[in-house]
Amino acid sequence: MTPDVAALDAMPAGEFVAAVAPLFEGAPGFLWRLAAARPFESQEMLFERARGIAHGMPEPLQVELVDAHPRLGAPSASVSAMSFREQGYDRQAAANLGGEAAREGERVAAELDRLNDAYEARFGFRYCVFVAGRSRAALLPDMAAALERERDSELQRALDAVVDIAEARSRA
């Protein structure tokens, strides 16, 4: 759990970066800027400033922030504990799916791989979305539609998703 905002405001910068890094999957260029933007005084202000910083950074740092998040459908062993839960790996393991459900899972995984490859080739950064409990299969149509959008609007959408994810994580 993330310390409260008063504690975050009082921490030395390095401790602050370490404390909030799990919310944003790392991304040091962003995190050090966020540390410098203190004090926040409230959760709302923290995430309002985070969004402003994310959108105002040079593009290479924006891409670093988006790419800090794992690919949708990345191997479960390669994702953070928070991403593990968000992407539903915990529910998948508990369900112990077999038969038709397992084949559908393989089909979705293959389609996610294909879409991830196409998205990254087209835009130069990972597809990042606030999963919010949706299944991987439910994410496929939006991910496919994203391939038709403009690069700048996709980058801005992904930056908003990063902050939305962090905000949800702070409440969990």
Image (cartoon, grey):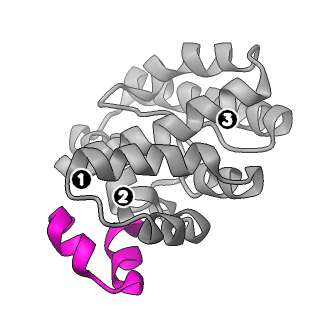
Q: Say whether marks 2 and 3 touch (CB < 8 Å).
A: no
Q: Position of residue 125 (x, y in %)?
A: 73, 44
The residue drawn where x is 58% and y is 29% is 157
Residue highlighted by disc 3: 155
The residue drawn where x is 35% and y is 25% is 134
The residue drawn where x is 53% and y is 41% is 73
**Mark 1 / mark 3, whichever is N-terminal:** 3
Residue interval drawn in magenta:
1-21
The overriding secondary structure of the stretch rendered in magenta is helix
Tag shown at residue 67 = none
**Mark 1 / mark 2, whichever is N-terminal:** 2
Q: Position of residue 63 (x, y in %)?
A: 69, 51
**Mark 2 / mark 3, whichever is N-terminal:** 2
In this rendering, is residue 70 above or below 86?
A: below
Residue highlighted by disc 1: 170
Residue 159: quadrant of the picture = top right
Relative to 138, 60 lies left or right = right
For disc 3, the neighbor class at 10 Å (few under 14, some 14 to 19, many from 20) is: many
The residue drawn where x is 49% and y is 22% is 139
Amino acid type at image mark 2:
Leu
**72 or 64: nearer the eye?**
64
Q: CA distance from mark 2 to mark 3?
A: 19 Å
Q: Secondary structure at mark 2?
A: helix
Amino acid type at image mark 1:
Ser
Amino acid type at image mark 3:
Leu
